[in-house]
Amino acid sequence: MTSFADPAKPDHVAIIMDGNGRWASGRGLKRIFGHRKGVEAVRRTVEAARLSGIRYLTLFAFSSENWKRPKDEVSDIMELISIFIHRELQNYHAQNMRFQMIGEREGLGPKVLGALEAAEHLTRGNTGLHVVVAVNYGSRAEIARAAVALAREAVDGRISPDEINEALISGRLDTAGIPDPDLIIRTSGEQRLSNFLMWQSAYSELVFLPCLWPEFSRDMFDEALREYARRTRRFGGVDEPASAMTGS
Ligand code: IPE
Ligand code: IPE
Ligand code: MG
């Protein structure tokens, strides 16, 4: 799904918040200090998104591959996610924001899962900025889960295998009902998706920024929106108006 409401402004911005570890090690600090500092950038970014009037903000907080990291780093990150939600939830709820988690719930600790689900539950009727947090998220795992769901429906006779199309697959992803991201921002200078929204990003505009995530600012967010406004999206078509085309 793509919104064409205002072609110069993204409806959905998704961010790969990368570079916390490098921010810390560049200062001779342990990686966890980079993650702590990164939480402040998350707060600034949610506020920037709210003020910019975009409808959806997706934040990649922890990937299904990040379990490979040292145990104490993983538990520190999970703790930071829970604390962030506990601290901000009432305030975000008062601002009419909606929270949603994408990613595999199984395997998450009860504390972080409890915080994420409580946030989803409390804000489910809100109509302001929709904040999607990707935790234990990986695109390949998400697509595989969608395939399992569709296979079950086919075996149960609820759908025929021949009916399976792009819309049915989209509808079984964690992001069902959420428009595809118009703009994906990645900080830290890396230029890859790292298993983030690979199905949904088919026609996303990508903006790679050299800054490390803890340095990400409101100005950088606004500059990424301006960069987006300068892009020409074609979705496989041509950008000339149809009336300018002559028959051959
Ligand atoms: C992003 O920063 C945060 C998570 C992946 C949880 P990193 O921790 O990946 O920071 P770098 O890439 O090592 O600098
Ligand atoms: C992607 O960053 C995951 C998040 C930002 C949560 P990584 O740091 O895990 O990605 P790679 O390993 O550099 O590709
Ligand atoms: Mg990284």
Image (cartoon, grey):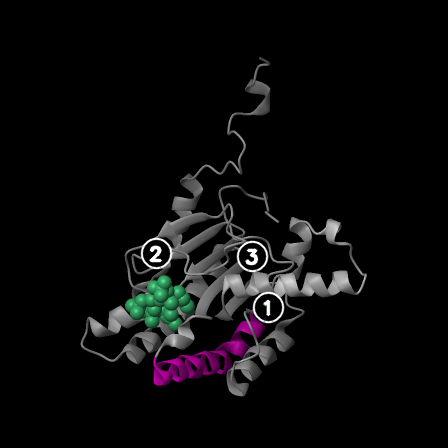
Residue at 63%, 77% (x, y): give it: 122
Instruction: Name which quarter of the figure residue 228 lies in.
Output: top left
| First to last magenta residue range | 70-95
x then y, percent, for residue 216:
33, 62
198 relative to 203, above or below: below
Where residue 103 sits, quadrant-wise, is bottom right
When asked about the image quadrant of residue 212, the answer is bottom left
Q: Is residue 3 left or right of residue 228?
A: right
Please name the residue that numbered disc 3 is placed on.
55
Secondary structure under tag 2 reads helix
What percent of the width, then of the height, locates residue 239? 50, 29
For the stretch drawn in magenta, the main secondary structure is: helix
Q: Are marks 3 and 2 in contact (CB under 8 Å)?
A: no
Residue 214 lies, in percent from the top left, at 31, 68
Does the Cβ of the disc 1 residue fall within 8 Å of ligand 2? no
Marks 1 and 3, how far apart at CA = 12 Å
Is residue 163 located in the magenta-colored stretch of the structure? no
Q: In the image, what residue occupies the spot 43% across and 39% down?
A: 231
Instruction: Name the residue tied to disc 1.
Output: 96
* Residue with the most extreme top position: 248
The residue lying at 51 percent from left, 36 percent from top is: 234
Image quarter hosting the C terminus: top right
- Residue 5 is labelled as none
Query: Which mark sits nearer the N-terminus, 3 or 2?
Result: 3
Whether residue 44 can be seen here: no
- Disc 2 residue type? Asp
Is 25 situated above or below 8? Answer: below
Element at label 1: loop
Crowding at label 3, few (<14), some or many (≥20) Cα neighbours within 10 Å? some
84 and 106: which is toward the camera: 106
Q: Which residue is mark 2?
A: 219
